[in-house]
Image (tube, grey):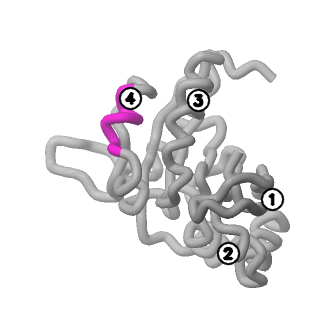
Amino acid sequence: MSLASKKIALGVTGGIAAYKACELVRRLKKAGAQVRVAMSDAAQKFVAPLTFATLSENPVVTSLFHGQEEMGVKHIDLARWSDLFVLAPATANILAKAAAGFADDIISTTILATRSPVLFCPAMNSAMWENPAVQANVAKLKEAGYAFVDPEFGALATSAEGEGWGR
């Protein structure tokens, strides 16, 4: 599938794998896609918005609310703009929010407002990934039609290895 001229919104949530989303933006741009990034508050603790703004060549959405100089409704604008909404890394927290229909930040509101396909790329510790609550949320989201790239086996943030490493 060609990514030329595709509009991809990337939702970066707050896990250690957030740094991998930088390379994802670079690869998507190299393939010809337009990329816009939204970041959760926690994601901004791992990677600065400036990094994504530089790589994507677009402003980064970091909050549901904005100053008076900005117009539009951020989550609606991003949802309408995108051909695909990718969540990478998708933390256990965002999986739970999406499964429950929560809408309390820029990422969760954009998920609810998006009519284009949504792709979750979970990344978390193996114990978290294997937790029945997380697996129930994944099953609920898959049943609702959301797509997933499941984590693979690899080195985790704890220096251990296990399933939960984001691709």
Mark 1 crowd level (few <14, some 14–19, many ≥20, 10 Å Cα): few
Q: Say which quarter of the image contains residue 124.
A: bottom right
Q: Is residue 127 above or below residue 160?
A: below
Residue type at mark 2? Met
Discs 4/3, front: 4
Residue at image mark 4: 58
Spot occupied by residue 58 in the image (x, y as percentages of width and height) = 38, 29
Q: Residue furthest left?
A: 68
Q: Is residue 2 above or below residue 141?
A: above
Tag 3 or tag 2, which sits nearer the N-term?
3
* Mark identifier at residue 128: 2
Distance of mark 4 from mark 3, alpha carbons? 12 Å
Task: Name the residue at 42% across, 51% down.
Answer: 39
Read off the magenta span: 48-54
Mark 2 crowd level (few <14, some 14–19, many ≥20, 10 Å Cα): some
Discs 2/4, front: 2
Query: What kind of element bears circle 4?
Result: loop
Residue at image mark 1: 145
Q: Name the quarter where the C terminus is drawn.
A: top right
Distance of mark 1 from mark 4, alpha carbons? 29 Å
Spot occupied by residue 130 in the image (x, y as percentages of width and height) = 77, 75
Tag 2 or tag 1, which sits nearer the N-term?
2
Task: Name the residue at 52% across, 30% down.
Answer: 35
Discs 1/2, front: 2
Is residue 32 visible to the viewer in this orientation of the structure? Answer: yes
Task: Name the magenta segment's main secondary structure.
Answer: helix
Q: Nearer the viewer, residue 46 or 29?
A: 46
**Magenta includes 50?**
yes
Residue type at mark 1? Gly
